[in-house]
Image (cartoon, helix red, strand yellow):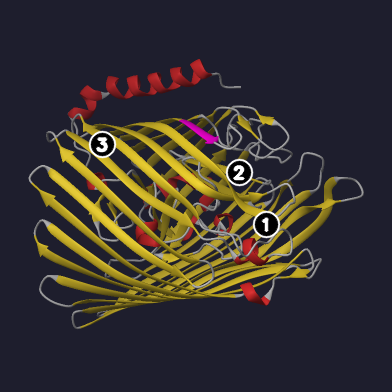
Amino acid sequence: MIKKNQLNAIVIAGIAWGIFHHSSASAQPTGETEPVIVTATRTAQIADQTLTPTIVITQQDIQLSQSRDVAELLRFHAGIELSRNGGPGQQTSLFVRGTESDHVIIMIDGVKMNASTVAVAAVQNMDPDLIERIEIVKGARSSLYGSEGIGGVINIITRKSTKPDTTAQLFAGVGSDNTNQVGYAFHTQVKNTRIGIDAKHLDTDGFPTVTTSSVDRGFKNNTLNTYVDTKAGTTDIGLSFWTAQGSTEYMEYNAITNLNDIPVDQNFNNSIGALSVKSPISTYGTARLKLSHMIDEITQNQSSDHAKTTRQAVDLQTDLSINNNNLFTAGLYYADEEVDAIIFGTPLSDTGKYNIVKAVFLQDDFTFAANHLVAALRYTDDKNFGNETTYNVDYGYTVSPQLQLLAGVGTGFRAPTPVDRFGAFGGNPELKAETSQNIELGSRYRLDDHHSFSLNVFQNDIDNLINYNAAFMLENIDETRIRGIELGYRLRQQNWTSRIDVIFQDPRDRTTGNILLRRAKRSLTAAIQYKINPHTIGADVLATSERQDFDATLASYAIVNLNYLYRLNKSWQFKTHIENLLNKQYQIASGYNTQGFFIMFNVEYKH
């Protein structure tokens, strides 16, 4: 168990270690470029120049981590907590800065993946090996992306080659729990056209999901990503398709024994197809059009239950550079959604099956002298429940080349789902949207090219939260307030990179006064990488305080992952991943097991 003073000691020791290495770092250039992020403003920016708290998980980070799904990768980054009902493929919830799991927008290449049935995305089915980078924006962002943008936005960018040469890649791995994976990638360019395909199969026996069972529950996932990008004159055209399909075994509740002891399984299908067009509309302007088709589907194999969301969307955006200091963005969004579901044997009412969402948004990104201001406004019209107007105003003041002060305010909302409004168990067609207001103060300090510090203080008030009343009918009856402080430190030099982030937060239900379930008041995430060719060694650390659950208090814990990469030559590399090095026994959901000591060996050939 990690006590409060022990957690504080870890933070101090980590920062002290970074300062201790200041002299050696200052003598060596990093040779690294700053990552670029698009999600914060829907336009390209250097990550350190955004006015909002952001995280960019690079391809180098992903490759070294060797995580088996996106959720496991995200949990080792600041402000993202994970709850999972067992092992790989099991039901997973992400809490960004203490908000609910349906208060974060998950996108793949800018296409929203949140299902209309439950308002969350199946991050447990998303494989990191097909990902180029992940962009995370914390805080309200409904002004740019609509419903569910209360706690943040996570945009997963799939792999695409930007090099003119042809590459082919084969990789395979074996590990604990009878885990096997194999994959293939091919990328080439013919004149102005780039073509690529990535495919992977993952199969694991897993481990017992619930603490009262000894039966392993497995997971199979087949992931495919393919694209064709071409240029016609000054116009860029892209066609892409991503899909994850497979099956998950789990334990179902048994009313006779009052235990989760019935072995069952389900099939899943998460897919997106998109057509993207980007073209200059003047010397100073650019237009972008994206047409997308999304499917989120789960089918139970031992019953007739299923849930399927289909969404066709049109996303039009224009960017106009008025001068070197002013970038104006305007856009339109249209989505046609269909939901088909049978829940516990009861079909969803036809009334809630269809929905149309329309939106218009505006944004101005303005820089003058030492000041930087970004203001955004969005009007969303939802055919089923009504309309919402949301905004963001973010401001930055550059005190010196080393120090920047930040402030921001923004609103968000979550529209009630068709299951919320028309489901057979407590559905209420009179539900209103959940709404929020987020206030943020922050600063960034760059000591030199190698050491940087960040501080963010935030308060997120969420009203009209949907919950069951005494008659077991859903109503807008709850409200929460989440206050927090984030402290971050980064070290980058020729051979070493490291980061340490600590969060102190108070995610509290203002109706009952209780701390929100499965959310910690204190957490620390850290990573360190050391590279000396042909070796790269990395470690990831996660420490969190105790959390409340429905029927228990979940103990605090700390876990360590180790990663190793050996590059034999330009073609061959070998990797090893150790998860939960110390075999820590802990829970992130009451009554459910977590991964014990796990080791995996991977080999990769690239030509």
Q: Are the residues flagged by discs 2 and 1 in contact, CB closer than 8 Å? A: no
The residue depicted at 54 percent of the width and 36 percent of the height is: 510
Question: Which disc is residue 513 wearing?
Answer: none
Where residue 473 appears, as percent x and y from the top left, is: 70, 55
The amino acid on which the numbered mark 1 sits, given as a three-letter code, is Phe
Question: Which disc is residue 83 wearing?
Answer: 2
Q: Tell me the CA gap for discs 2 and 1.
A: 18 Å
Q: Is residue 370 above or below residue 310?
A: above
Q: Tell me the CA gap for discs 1 and 3.
A: 40 Å
Nearest to viewer (mark 1 / mark 3): 1
The residue depicted at 49 percent of the width and 21 percent of the height is: 7
Where residue 385 appears, as percent x and y from the top left, is: 53, 67
Which stretch appears magenta?
A: 505-509
Badge 1 element: strand
Which secondary structure type mostly characterizes the magenta part of the structure?
A: strand
**Image check: 532 left or right of 451?**
right
Question: How dense is the environment of label 2, judged by Cα within 10 Å: few (below 14), some, or many (20 and up)?
Answer: many
Q: Tell me the CA gap for discs 3 and 2.
A: 36 Å
| In front of the other: 125 or 508 | 508
The amino acid on which the numbered mark 2 sits, given as a three-letter code, is Ser
Q: Are the residues flagged by discs 1 and 3 in contact, CB closer than 8 Å? A: no
Q: Magenta segment: does it hold 490? A: no
Q: Is residue 273 above or below residue 138?
A: below
| In front of the other: 478 or 325 | 478
Q: Magenta segment: does it hold 506? A: yes
